[in-house]
Image: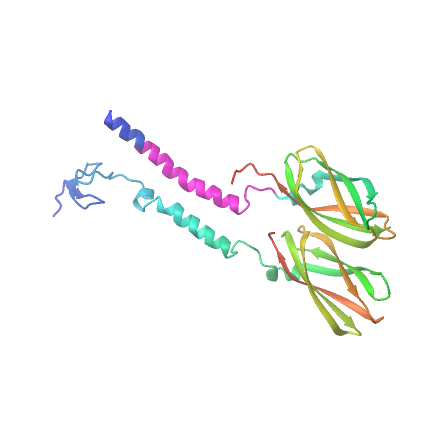
Amino acid sequence: MKNKTLKKYMNFSAVISTLIPLFFIAMFMHLTGSFESNYEEYRNKFSIELIAVNDIDDSDKVTITYRITNNSWRDWQWINYQVLHKNNDKIIYSSNSMIYDWEIDAGEQALLTVEVDKLPNITAFELTIQELKNRTRFPL
Amino acid sequence: MTSLSNRKCSHCVAEIPKAATVCSHCRRDQNESWYKKVGGARIPLILSVLIFVAFNYGMFEKKYSNYNEDFDIKQENIISLNDIDKRVVFNIKNNSNVMWKKLAYQVITKHDGKVIDVESRKSNYWAIQPHSSSYITVETYAKHPNTTWEFIITDLSTDY
C-alpha cells in the first residue's frame, strides 16, 4: 500500500516536472505574441461601408459612422484607424485614433462612429483600419 | 574503497549496492531524471527571470534605426488656411515587413533652402502596416512665399 502511494506520487511528480517547463515555454510564446494573429494577414477579410455623416450642433466637428464587416473566422478588438478627408482625389487632412473597447465578432458586422473636424470642401471620408488585435483565448 | 558490487549514492556518497534504486541511507532515488538532477525546479525560475529581464531591456523590440532606409516620405498636399497658417499632408510608405506605431517626427521649415524652424512632435495613435502607405497631417506656417517643409521620422515603435 505504501509502495503504491509512493509510485503514484512519483508518477505525479514526473508529470508536473514535465509540465512546468512546457508551461514556461507557452508563457514565453504568449509574451512574444506567438499565439496572436496579425491583422495584416486578415486585412482583405474586412469591408468598410460609410453609412452616415452627421454635423454636431454648435460644433466644428462631424460624426461619421461606418459599418465594418468581419469576414474572417476570428474575433477582433482594439481598433486603430486613420480617417482621410478628401476633396475629390486629393487628401486634405488625415487623422489617427484608437478605440480600445471596440469589438467585432467573427463573421459579424459592427458599427464604428468617429468624430472628426469639420473642414470645408470635403467630398469623401475614407477609413483605413491600421490595426486590430485579435481577442485571445489565452488567459494570461 | 567501493567494492565491485557496490557504488556510491549520487546524493550522499554513501556506499550502496549497484542494483539499488533507492539509497538505504538518504532514501533518494538513484534513477532520477536529468531534470531533477540539475535541480529542475530552479530552471523555470531562472528562465522566467531571464525572460523578464530581456523584456524590460527591450531585447525583443525592433529598433527603427535599423529600418529607417525602408521608408519613403513624400509631400502629398499643402492647404492654405490663411495667409500664414498651412496644413501639409505627408505620405509615408513603409517598405519593411514590420508594423510600426507611435510616430515621432520633426518638421523642418525652410525658406529659400535655409532652415528657419524645426518642430519635434509625436503621434501616439499613428500606425502603419508592413508594405503599405499611411498619411500624417501637420499644421504649420509659412511667412514667406518660398517656404518648404521637410519631414523626418525620428522614431517609431513596435508596441504601444
The part of the image, by quadrant, that contains residue B144 is: bottom right
- The answer to whether A66 appears left or right of B47 in the picture is right
- Taking the view exactly as shown, the residue that stands out farthest to the front is A58
Q: Main secondary structure of the magenta part?
A: helix
Q: Is residue A30 left or right of residue A107?
A: left
State yes or no: residue A43 in magenta.
no
- Residue shown at 58% from the left, 59% from the top: B63
Q: Quadrant of the N terminus of chain A?
A: top left
Q: How is the image coloured?
A: rainbow
Percent of width and height locating residue A74 = 63, 36
Magenta stretch contains residue A31: yes
Which residue is depicted at the point 67% across and 52% down?
Answer: B127
* Residue at the spot 31% in from the left edge and 29% down from the top edge: A8
Q: Position of residue A116 (x, y in %)?
A: 78, 49
Q: Please name the residue shown 34% across and 36% down the image.
A: A14
What's drawn in magenta, residue-wise?
A10-37
Q: Return the residue nearer the eye: B44 or B1.
A: B44
The location of residue A51, given as percent across then percent down, is: 81, 38
Above or below for A130 versus B151: above
x and y percentages locating residue A78 in the rendered image: 65, 43
